[in-house]
Image (tube, helix red, strand yellow):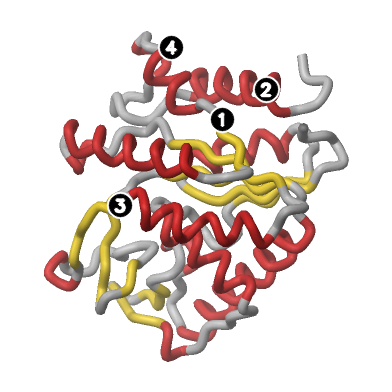
């Protein structure tokens, strides 16, 4: 169980950020997406591997898009008008993430989508609005996800890994494509050994069905829905939570 003495690292989609910010506001030692949002399982696992390798980025790792320098391994919030500023932000985020992983006794990971974009054979974290022709889009297999994550879990027997699937629908994938994506994520998580699961997806999709639980776009959960999911998260996973 999570206690007030726990140190928590949260990685994943924007839903992770919503929950993580609430944990931090309630006084928990929670580091939330230090390198920015991570939507697919391979970008999240690669981020951990880069942290473990003490990787620091150089100008050769950056690209310029619309006047801002960016890394394909990082979220757009770390982009900057100059390479030096971008590297300062990116490498600062890597140092923060490295410290958080080292200290964390709980690692909470939210998978958003099983679809990935590859550029030059490498899965990217963010396409940064580059032309679609530069990428190959495909859906990960269950085996690819478990092969990426099981070794990470096994390397840290002292940490508790808790996985969730983001309840946010990716309508750009089509309704059927979104269902296939979410099913892939669920099956992959179910295949992981020594890992926990929290039913954020099921709570919103199967329980909180009223329109008030959705934002104006009918895709993202409303603040009321996130509050309800967070309340259930606390009851399920936090010691002495009422």
Q: Name the residue under label 3.
A: 141
**Secondary element type, mark 3:** loop
Q: Are marks 2 and 1 in contact (CB under 8 Å)?
A: yes
Label whose residue precedes the other's in the sequence (3 or 1): 3
Q: Nearer the viewer, residue 146 or 41?
A: 146
Q: Do the residues labelled 3 and 1 touch (CB within 8 Å)?
A: no
**Secondary element type, mark 2:** helix
Which residue is at 43% across, 13% downward?
A: 208
Which residue is at 19% across, 42% downward?
A: 173
Along the horizontal axis of the image, is 164 left or right of 157? left
Q: Position of residue 5 (x, y in %)?
A: 87, 41
Q: Name the residue under label 4.
A: 207
Along the horizontal axis of the image, is 229 left or right of 4? left
Along the horizontal axis of the image, is 18 left or right of 202? right
Please tell me the numbered disc located at residue 72: none
Displayed quadrant of residue 155:
bottom right
- Between the residue at mark 4 and the residue at mark 2, the CA separation in whole angstroms equals 16 Å
Q: Quadrant of the N terminus?
A: top right
Label whose residue precedes the other's in the sequence (2 or 1): 1
- Between the residue at mark 3 and the residue at mark 1, the CA separation in whole angstroms equals 21 Å
Q: Are marks 1 and 4 in contact (CB under 8 Å)?
A: no
Q: Nearer the viewer, residue 123 or 183?
A: 183
Label whose residue precedes the other's in the sequence (4 or 2): 4
| Image height of 41 relative to 61, above or below | above
**Secondary element type, mark 1:** loop
Q: How many neighbours does mark 1 have within 10 angstroms: few (below 14), some (14-19), or many (20 or more)?
A: some
Q: Position of residue 104 (x, y in %)?
A: 75, 53
Q: Nearer the viewer, residue 23 or 123?
A: 123
Q: Which callout, 1 or 4, points to the residue nearer the camera?
A: 1
Q: Quadrant of the C terminus?
A: top right
- Between the residue at mark 3 and the residue at mark 4, the CA separation in whole angstroms equals 28 Å
């Amino acid at each position: 169980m999570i206690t007030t003495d726990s140190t928590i690292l949260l990685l994943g989609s924007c839903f992770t950020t919503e929950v993580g910010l609430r944990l931090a506001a309630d006084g928990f030692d929670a580091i939330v997406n230090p390198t920015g949002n991570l939507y697919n399982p391979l970008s999240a696992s690669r981020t951990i591997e880069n942290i473990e390798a003490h990787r620091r980025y150089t100008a050769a790792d950056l690209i310029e898009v619309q006047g801002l320098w960016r890394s394909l391994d990082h979220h757009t919030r770390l982009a900057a008008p100059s390479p030096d500023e971008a590297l300062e932000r990116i490498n600062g985020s890597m140092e923060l993430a490295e410290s958080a992983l080292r200290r964390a006794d709980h690692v909470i990971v939210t998978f958003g989508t099983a679809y990935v974009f590859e550029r030059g054979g490498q899965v990217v974290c963010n396409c940064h609005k580059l032309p679609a022709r530069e990428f190959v889009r495909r859906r990960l297999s269950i085996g690819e996800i478990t092969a990426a994550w099981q070794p990470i879990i096994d390397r840290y027997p002292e940490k508790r890994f808790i996985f969730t699937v983001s309840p946010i629908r990716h309508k750009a994938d089509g309704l059927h494509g979104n269902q296939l994506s979410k099913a892939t994520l669920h099956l992959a998580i179910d295949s992981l050994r020594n890992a926990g699961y929290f039913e954020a997806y099921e709570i919103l999709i199967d329980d909180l069905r009223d329109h008030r639980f959705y934002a104006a776009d009918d895709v993202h959960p409303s603040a009321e829905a996130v509050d309800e999911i967070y309340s259930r998260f606390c009851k399920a996973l936090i010691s002495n939570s009422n």
